[in-house]
Amino acid sequence: MDHKINKRDFIKYGFLGSCAFALGIGKAQAFSIILSENKEELWKWSKLSKYYIDTPKGIKCLICPNECVIKEGEAGDCKSRINHQSKIYSIGYGNPCSINVDPIEKKPLYHFLPESKAFSLAVAGCNLACLNCQNWQISQVGPKETRNFDLMPPEVYKQAEYYKCQSIAYTYSEPIAFYEYFLDSSKIAHEHGMKNVMVSAGYINEKPLREVAKYIDAANIDLKSFDDELYARLNAGKLQPVLDTLKILKDEGVWLEITNLIVPEWTDDMGMIKQMCKWLYKNGFDETPLHFSRFSPLYKLTHLSPTPVNVLNNTRTIAQDAGLKYVYIGNVPGSNSQNTICPKCKETVIERKGFSILQNNIVNGKCKSCNTPIAGIWN
């Protein structure tokens, strides 16, 4: 059942139209009360960033590897960070454009609190520019171009609690683009014992990642390909920062799952996929679930066909042969490759259909049949 929060819900519970001070956010949020669009003032939903420096060429943002040098009054590549009076501000603070209650399996996270609900939110903007973007209507525009809710960090937790969610998922667009909102909301949820989930392309610098990782319980990182030229041509990014993110999240103790979208004519090279899987195994990700996802023709690649199922089956075989224990295929209805199989006795420990769990044979984190530990966070 879809539990999308609408304007009526917010009016009913008194959250729509509340200002920064009424929500008790404190002095750091004083700028968020300013409503003027005048360039001499800040937009209502703004917060000063910690991660920028003044250089001889201008103010440089340090949130992600793009490290945009942003001119006065202009925005960076992500469309959600501006230079105002020689300081970098996020304009994606407390103004999500999409809010929904999702099954955790939709993230996708298959080894993290099965059958639980995630309070999912997004703010417009992204620091990449993927030709195949599935949420381009919100990720390839800025926060001023979308219809938004007024939902400051304390209310994010309250809404998640009201809807009986076990986690808050920062998803749909790119949480790195609304980093300050993501960070502050995660801190509050963490203080109250609620889990935080990051669904991201992982294109972030080490220092801000390590700061927010202290409050993240699980992440799904989109490893878009295993080739630097492909990253530049398809996504406007680079490979190495994403590989660094995977290592950092693992080092910080965040439960991690990885998604690899197989785009025909772009990322369906079996040699490259084999290389990627070998790297994952070599770097200790053999028990990290890997989701090969089927491409649907969207945004700037509508001329392509959906990924053939036999191609997805081949990628799964390559990953398993490389030693990866938990490999799944996504966006293929009815596929039994959504099931979790015990790596020792080969029994099905979790049977799935879509985002639903049909049976769960994991007891105390172990296979019910042979008592082998199944990697994940189950309780």
Image (cartoon, rainbow, N blue to C red):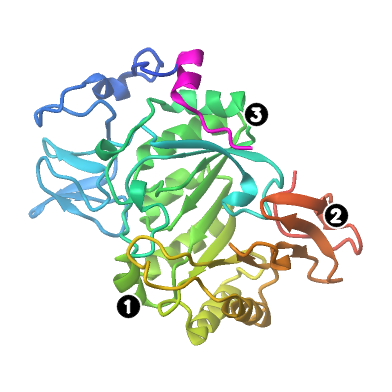
- The x, y position of residue 285, in whole percent, is 60, 68
Q: Is residue 3 left or right of residue 66?
A: right
The magenta region covers: 1-14
Badges 3 and 1: C-beta atoms under 8 Å apart? no
Q: Earlier in the sequence, mark 3 or mark 1?
A: 3
The secondary structure type at the circle numbered 3 is loop
**Is residue 3 highlighted in magenta?**
yes
Are there few (<14), some (14-19), or many (20+) residues within 10 Å of tag 3?
some
Residue where numbered disc 1 is placed: 229
The residue depicted at 32 percent of the width and 47 percent of the height is: 125
Q: Is residue 187 left or right of residue 38?
A: right
Q: Earlier in the sequence, mark 3 or mark 2?
A: 3
The secondary structure type at the circle numbered 1 is helix
- The x, y position of residue 248, in whole percent, is 49, 58
Residue where numbered disc 3 is placed: 164
Q: Earlier in the sequence, mark 2 or mark 1?
A: 1
When the figure is inspected, residue 108 is found, relative to residue 270, above or below; the finding is above
Residue where numbered disc 2 is placed: 361
**Outermost residue, bottom side:** 271
* Residue 90 seen from this side: no
The quadrant of the picture occupied by the N terminus is top right
The quadrant of the picture occupied by the C terminus is top right
Residue 322 in which image quadrant: bottom right
Amino acid, disc 2: Asn
Amino acid, disc 1: Glu
* Residue 44 seen from this side: yes
Are there few (<14), some (14-19), or many (20+) residues within 10 Å of tag 1?
some
**Outermost residue, right side:** 369
The residue depicted at 54 percent of the width and 23 percent of the height is: 158
Amino acid, disc 3: Lys
Are there few (<14), some (14-19), or many (20+) residues within 10 Å of tag 2?
some
**Is residue 241 highlighted in magenta?**
no
